[in-house]
Image: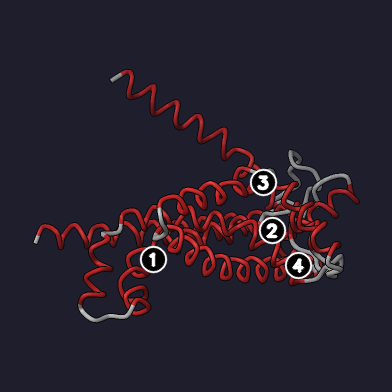
Amino acid sequence: MVKKIFAKCYIWLILLIMYAPILTLFVFSFTESKNIGSWTGFSFRLYLDMFKNEEIMTALLNTILIAVSSALVSTVIGTLGAIGIFYSKKKTKKAFDMIGQIPVMNAEIVTAISLTILFVFFGVKFNFVTLLIGHVVLTIPFVVLSVTPKLKQLDPNIYEAALDLGATPKKALWGVVIPEILPGIFSGFMLSITLSLDDYIITAFTRDNSFSTLSTYVYGATAKKGALPPTLRALSTILTLIILVVLLIINAKTKNQATIKRHKDVR
């Protein structure tokens, strides 16, 4: 009994340490004080100023645009890559597995500098396309890592059965394999969006200076003023709440699907 109480207290302490900064940011987003720690009264002023700030709104839209675009491209390429690697011969599969882990383990600054040198070497001007390529390079390995476990859980006889029943390889892929690994594909998509949203290094090295994202805006605003602008507290709070709502919806949906599946198995 004592061990259980100690374990629960320990877990709650760790969670408090992890989320205390976010909670602090959330609380002080409802006051006009320029400095966190100084309360000047409850107010929604920072939220109103945030929506009126054209730079923040432009950066937000640009961030969403590049995150969704790169996530879509990465999900398609990463899923097809994971399927291709999974159904390859053992030696080829092992080699590609090792190669696929390098971008994950490699320092992000190395990837950013490598992309910059590559674009400069071929005389490519930095624009939205170069930024998109940078984010796709960053996120593809994580899509592969998300899809591969689902492929390993897949019964290989299902695909072969589909072929034996007259389905073409393409039909068997889209009608049998893809639906079975869909949770892994969705996880890879969400992970890609998350990685793209808060990326700064690759964005800073591969973007055009006229194209700003939230990460570059926050860095620039902080560098100019020497401290976090008050309106960014409101922006951070909104982003955190959106992510929280999305996670709650996904968890509720997953739990519901698990309950339905369990009831079917009982029948």
Point out residue 39 in the picture as x, y percentages from the top left corner: 73, 43
Q: Earlier in the sequence, mark 3 or mark 4?
A: 3
Label 4: few (<14), some (14–19) or many (≥20) C-alpha neighbours in 10 Å: many
> Residue 124, relative to residue 191: is it above or below?
below
Which residue matches tag 4? 130
In the image, what residue type sits under mark 3?
Answer: Leu
In the image, what residue type sits under mark 1?
Answer: Leu
In the image, what residue type sits under mark 2?
Answer: Leu
The residue positioned 39% from the left and 52% from the top of the image is 149
In the image, what residue type sits under mark 4?
Answer: Thr
Element at badge 3? helix
Which residue matches tag 3? 25
Can you name the residue that lies furthest to the right here? Answer: 224
Of circles 4 and 2, the one toward us is 4
The residue positioned 39% from the left and 56% from the top of the image is 251
Q: Of 130 and 50, which appears nearest the observer?
A: 130
Q: CA distance from mark 4 to mark 2?
A: 27 Å
Q: CA distance from mark 1 to mark 2?
A: 32 Å
Q: Of 181 and 218, which appears nearest the observer?
A: 181
Point out residue 18 in the picture as x, y percentages from the top left corner: 57, 37
Q: Earlier in the sequence, mark 4 or mark 2?
A: 4
Which quarter of the figure is the N terminus placed in? top left
Q: CA distance from mark 1 to mark 3?
A: 36 Å
Which residue matches tag 2? 235
Labelled disc at residue 182: 1
> Residue 41, relative to residue 246: is it above or below?
above
